[in-house]
Image (tube, grey):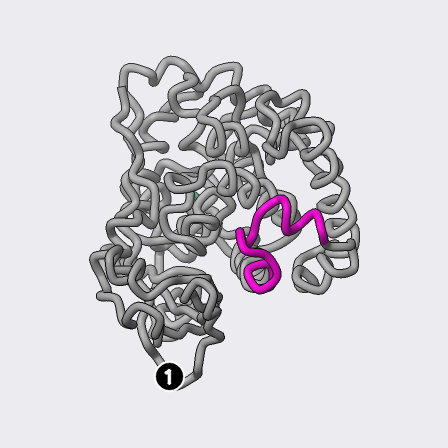
Amino acid sequence: MPSKRVLSPSFNALTKKKKLVGAPGEPNVTKITGSTRVKGDEMTRKESAYRAIDDSVPEIDNNDHSARVKVEFEYELPPNVFPKADPEDINAGPPAWTTIYNEIVEMRSKFHAPVDGQGCESMPNTITPGLKLSDPKRYRFQLLISLMLSSQTKDEVNYDAMVNLNTGLGNKHAQGFCLEAMSQLSPPEIDSYICKVGFHNRKAQYIAKTCQILKSEFDGDIPKTIEEIVKLPGVGPKMGYLLLQAGWGINSGIGVDVHLHRLALLWGWVSKKATTPEKCRLELESWIPKKYWSDINPLIVGFGQVVCVPRASNCDICALGRKGLCSAANKNLLRGPVTEERKAKLMKQRADLTTLINQYL
Ligand code: SF4
């Protein structure tokens, strides 16, 4: 059995990095990428990761000695630890699939892709450290919203929109970014926070409608079955299966996005008939053992975001290319020469690829 994947970033990893600043009633912590409501004594107890970075004065509520402060997180993501595929499962699928899978696990341990801190599953915890454990219902709601925002949108842009929502709703509602706060917003108000994501107008309307449905039909929580989830406006199967896995721990399907779809076709893990993510999902689920269903999305997505990127794959730093495991490898890149210009280009990818560059170039 694979060991449990280490999710990132962990609350402990965050809290160990920084000491708290601010005495009870005098929170003097500030930040840049978001805001949260804190109490000085509470922060001190928890050794929060917030730190003072400038002289701005937080808005203090004298009723409860709390303050709305800007915060900046300083943390290091823990290493990506995806369990390797069991070699005994090799006969379950196409030739050498476990070898390819395990090479990707190795490569993924050497860099952090956007999906690792800013993907839908990790994003609520990145914005509010420890949220999944401290408030699972609010985590599930934020996870649903991040998934609804994610289509046709890069993780980094989606993350900024979620931070905007967290800040804006935090200023309006005692519970911050939650269903109650969101359901009080009109679609144009929602749109004002998410205007950088793709199809933001339509997504704002879907979110407003979804909030009403969650309140009236699901007791303010998210549904627990894929059939109910995909009935929510703007929510498809990919989002639904990821939501069930991360939100409820229910592993009933593979979340197939554009990267997993593209790479499954590239490696022959699905047939050419799998022309849509949904057809791809059904083919993958027909042979991939269920124990890999929840890891395969973040594992492959991160690889597709920075190594095997669309239209410009970086085969010269890819173990599959170097070891002859990928028939689509760009032979010119593998032959070199390795110029400084090429290295500089690799350093501009969406992740720090130094370890792979040093290994192969
Ligand atoms: S060798 Fe190239 S095409 Fe093949 S998986 Fe690696 S980066 Fe992608």
Q: Position of residue 46 (x, y in %)?
A: 26, 55
Please check the rendered image and state whether residue 204 is part of the magenta-colored stretch, yes or no.
Answer: no
Using the image, determine if residue 238 lies above or below residue 111: above
- Judging depth in this view, the residue of 241 and 66 nearest the camera is 66
Q: Position of residue 279 (x, y in %)?
A: 65, 24
Q: Position of residue 230 (x, y in %)?
A: 69, 28
Quadrant in the rendering for residue 58:
bottom left
Please check the rendered image and state whether residue 176 is part of the magenta-colored stretch, yes or no.
Answer: yes
Q: Quadrant of ligand 1?
A: top left
Magenta residues span 168-184
Residue visible at 66% across and 60% down in the picture? 194
In this rendering, would 268 be left or right of 346?
A: right
**Type of residue at label 1?**
Asp
Q: Which residue is mark 1?
A: 54
Can I make out residue 91 in this image? Answer: yes
Residue visible at 44% across and 21% down in the picture? 94
